[in-house]
């Protein structure tokens, strides 16, 4: 049985936009309504942890109300013909809920918290157990925090992600403004000759080697699945 070609899909907030989750930098986006350095940075968390806990509690509630869209499902469907790894900047769980089996979360996961004393202790939240606060404690009595990579914090998965992109036979980028590093630099790890597609209705400037598909995620993925299915 021949090895399936390796497809790496790099996603940003745009892939979840059609599920009803607002992006960050489009007009009316999250950062228009919340000062990013207050609710999503290490300094902001140190300054006012209760505000940060409330921000992520609100985003968890929003996540429970939405479903994966057909772009998430198309990405999962491509696993029939490719070994697919999704490397996402998103903290939602829509890729997993759509059926993707290999997802790397560069910026953490909304439905998880972790011990502040032992960061390796990561805990799943669920619909009955959504909210956290500075008073929340794990079973060892230690405070917990959102399992999110805040601005000003390192991205632990970036080396592994770069190595995965280097192995890719095809790369697809969906719905990211390409302004947040190191995630935005991952496309540079695609080997020469490897096709790279970028689906975005308002694409950021990218090198000529990248094929831009100026479309929403659901429409762009519909085209790509037709192209990629054997
Ligand atoms: N389909 C595809 N792309 C879309 C759609 C859609 N329906 N709607 C919007 N977009 C595109 C926008 O054109 C933009 O390029 O999604 C992108 C969203 O960009 P951002 O809001 O900057 O989101 P993202 O690139 O994921 O942000 C990166 O910044 O704030 C941090 O940690 C946060 O992971 C996030 C990171």
Image (cartoon, grey):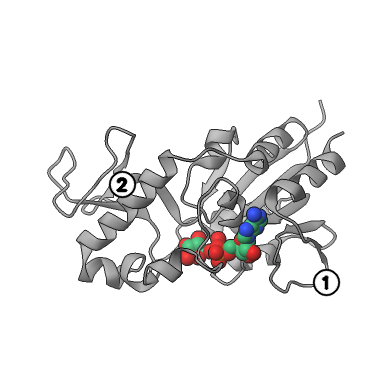
> In the displayed image of the protein, which residue is found farthest to the top?
1
Quarter of the picture holding the N terminus: top right
Label 1: element kind:
loop
Q: Is residue 33 left or right of residue 29?
A: left
Does label 2 point to a residue whose CB lies under 8 Å from ligand 1? no
Residue found 51% across the figure and 53% down from its top: 90
**Which residue is labeled 1 in the image?**
208
Classify residue 174 by image quadrant. bottom right
Q: Quadrant of ligand 1?
A: bottom right
Residue 200: x, y in percent? 70, 60
Crowd around label 1: few <14 · some 14–19 · many ≥20 (10 Å): few
Position of residue 167 relative to residue 31, above or below, is above
Quarter of the picture holding the C terminus: top right
Q: Is residue 95 left or right of residue 149?
A: right
Classify residue 63 by image quadrant. top left
Residue found 71% across the figure and 67% down from its top: 203
**Which residue is labeled 2 in the image?**
113
């Amino acid at each position: 049985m021949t090895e399936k070609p390796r497809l790496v899909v790099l996603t940003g907030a745009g892939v979840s936009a059609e599920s009803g989750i607002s992006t960050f930098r489009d007009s009316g986006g999250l950062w228009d309504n919340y000062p990013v350095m207050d609710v999503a940075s290490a300094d902001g968390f140190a300054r006012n942890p209760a505000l940060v806990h409330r921000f992520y509690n609100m985003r968890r509630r929003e996540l429970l109300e939405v479903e994966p869209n057909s772009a998430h499902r198309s990405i999962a469907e491509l696993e029939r013909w490719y070994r697919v790894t999704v490397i996402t900047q998103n903290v939602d769980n829509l890729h997993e809920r759509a059926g993707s089996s290999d997802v790397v979360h560069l910026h953490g996961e909304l439905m998880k918290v972790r011990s502040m004393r032992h960061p390796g202790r990561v805990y799943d939240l669920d619909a009955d157990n959504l909210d956290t606060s500075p008073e929340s404690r794990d079973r060892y009595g230690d405070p917990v925090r959102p399992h999110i990579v805040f601005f000003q914090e390192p991205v632990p998965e970036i080396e592994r992600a770069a190595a995965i992109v280097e192995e890719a036979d095809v790369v697809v980028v969906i719905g990211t403004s390409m302004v947040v590093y190191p995630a935005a630099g991952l496309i540079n790890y695609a080997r020469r000759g490897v096709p790279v597609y970028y689906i975005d209705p308002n694409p950021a400037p990218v090198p000529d080697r990248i094929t831009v598909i100026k479309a929403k995620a659901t429409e762009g993925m519909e085209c790509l699945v037709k192209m990629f299915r054997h």
